[in-house]
Image: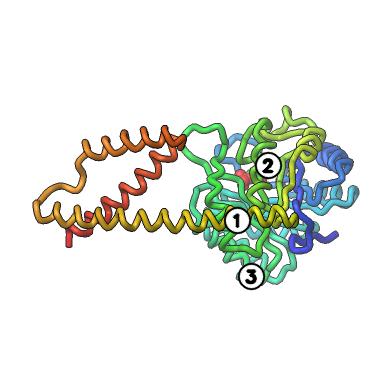
């Protein structure tokens, strides 16, 4: 059985349990997934990198055969996570079709390089999850290390980023990071993993829809015949039946419009946006020019850059205007802080010159 991201129709659907637990669990889950008919790749972890010790750390290499056999029995190619050279060797030897590098491995260039060295010379497809930390360059580096091996069928997986702050997500999606990866690696498909982003069943559908609306190429969703009793990630796993329901509700929108009337309306509106953006930047440039003049005067008169009262007054009065204009309070606050930060930067430069 072969699988190539490059030749695949979109969206690519990857499903299967967080972990291989026993032979029956893999077979029964795969059998039910097969009836859905939309599953392109069967996922399951053999070696589980757990953040804390004492949790289920995976069934180990004996599970490889169960996973490969289940894939063969139901005609679905299979994928598992590899975290070191030994995993790569064992997975490839047992006939796993696609390998993935997990979030806790992508953070470590030594591990990624070890995996890349073991991959060299093999014609296998590889998926690279984002690192657990919101560090774009670590993700870029991992992709580069894998591409340097000569392997070309590479995909990205967006699984969110851990953070200290409490949020409704288990892992904060920080959509800006995968979007930047899509720009940097425009020829590589990107798969969203709503299970690890959400960390709970109820969030899977909305995160999946958002990913499709961001023009991502596929979804990886953890699926288990008995989610409540799963040995890992029980809260976020769903049954194959729930997966079918979600897949039926998701709307796959086109990236490029084909309706001529719509195209013409869109072009017209975009021309207006182009014009307004020009005006926005022009106004900002004028504002910063005045900031420059204020900076010069402050320097000549030995006055501090920041006058807190003035800054608080700006925030208050502008937010009042924003309210009248029905602009979001949070957005205007963020925008003003950004402009203020740049103003302070410019004036610091003048004062220290
Ligand atoms: C997994 O896919 O089960 C997994 C461990 O993922 P991540 O590396 O994203 O935490
Ligand atoms: Mn998991």
Image point 64% across, 60% down: which residue?
A: 85
Quadrant of residue 113 within the rendered picture: bottom right
Residue 71 percent location from the top left of the image: 85, 50
Give me the C-alpha separation between circle 2 and circle 1.
Answer: 28 Å
Classify mark 2: residues with Cα within 10 Å, few (<14), some (14-19) or many (20+).
many
Which quadrant is home to the N terminus? bottom right
Q: Which sits in the foreground, 291 or 168? A: 291
Q: Which mark is residue 334?
A: none
Q: Earlier in the sequence, mark 3 or mark 1?
A: 3
Nearest to the eye among marks 3 and 1: give it: 1
Quadrant where the C terminus is found in the figure = bottom left
Residue annotated with mark 3: 149
The residue indicated by pointer 2 is 209
Q: Quadrant of residue 188?
A: bottom right
Determine if the C-beta at disc 2 is less than 8 A from ligand 1: no
**Left or right of 152 on screen, residue 74:** right
Q: Which badge, 2 or 1, is on the more N-terminal residue?
A: 2
Q: Is mark 1 within 8 Å of ligand 1?
A: no
Q: Is residue 238 left or right of residue 103?
A: right
* Residue picked out by circle 1: 268
Q: In screen coordinates, is 271 left or right of 314?
A: right
Q: Nearer the viewer, mark 2 or mark 1?
A: 1
């Amino acid at each position: 059985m072969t699988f190539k991201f490059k030749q695949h129709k979109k969206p690519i659907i990857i499903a299967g349990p967080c972990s291989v637990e026993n032979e029956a669990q893999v077979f029964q889950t795969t059998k039910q997934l097969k009836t859905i008919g939309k599953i392109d790749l069967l996922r399951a972890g053999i070696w589980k990198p757990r953040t804390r010790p004492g949790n289920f750390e995976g069934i180990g290499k004996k599970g490889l055969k169960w996973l490969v056999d289940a894939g063969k029995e139901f005609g679905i190619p299979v994928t598992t996570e590899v975290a070191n050279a030994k995993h790569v060797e064992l997975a490839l030897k047992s006939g796993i079709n696609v390998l993935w590098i997990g979030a806790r491995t992508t953070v470590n260039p030594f591990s990624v390089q070890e995996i890349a060295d073991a991959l060299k010379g093999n014609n296998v497809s590889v998926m690279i999850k984002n690192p657990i930390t919101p560090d774009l360059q670590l993700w870029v580096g991992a992709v580069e290390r894998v591409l340097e091996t000569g392997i070309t069928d590479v995909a990205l997986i967006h699984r969110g980023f851990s953070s200290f702050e409490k949020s409704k997500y288990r892992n904060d999606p920080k959509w800006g990071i995968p979007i930047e990866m899509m720009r940097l690696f425009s020829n590589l498909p990107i798969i969203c993993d709503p299970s690890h982003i959400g960390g709970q069943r109820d969030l899977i559908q909305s995160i999946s829809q958002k990913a499709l609306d961001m023009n991502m190429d596929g979804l990886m969703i953890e699926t288990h015949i008995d989610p409540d009793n799963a040995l890992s990630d029980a809260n976020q796993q769903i049954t194959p039946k729930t997966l079918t329901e979600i897949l039926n509700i998701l709307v796959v929108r086109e990236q490029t419009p084909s309706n001529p009337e719509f195209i013409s309306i869109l072009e017209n509106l975009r021309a207006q946006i182009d014009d307004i953006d020009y005006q926005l930047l022009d106004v900002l440039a004028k504002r910063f020019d005045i900031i420059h003049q204020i900076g010069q005067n402050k320097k000549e008169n030995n006055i501090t850059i920041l006058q807190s009262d003035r800054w608080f007054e700006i925030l208050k009065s502008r937010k009042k205007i924003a309210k009248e204009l029905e602009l979001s309070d949070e957005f205007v606050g963020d925008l003003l802080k950004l402009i203020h930060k740049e103003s302070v930067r410019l004036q610091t430069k003048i004062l220290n010159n």
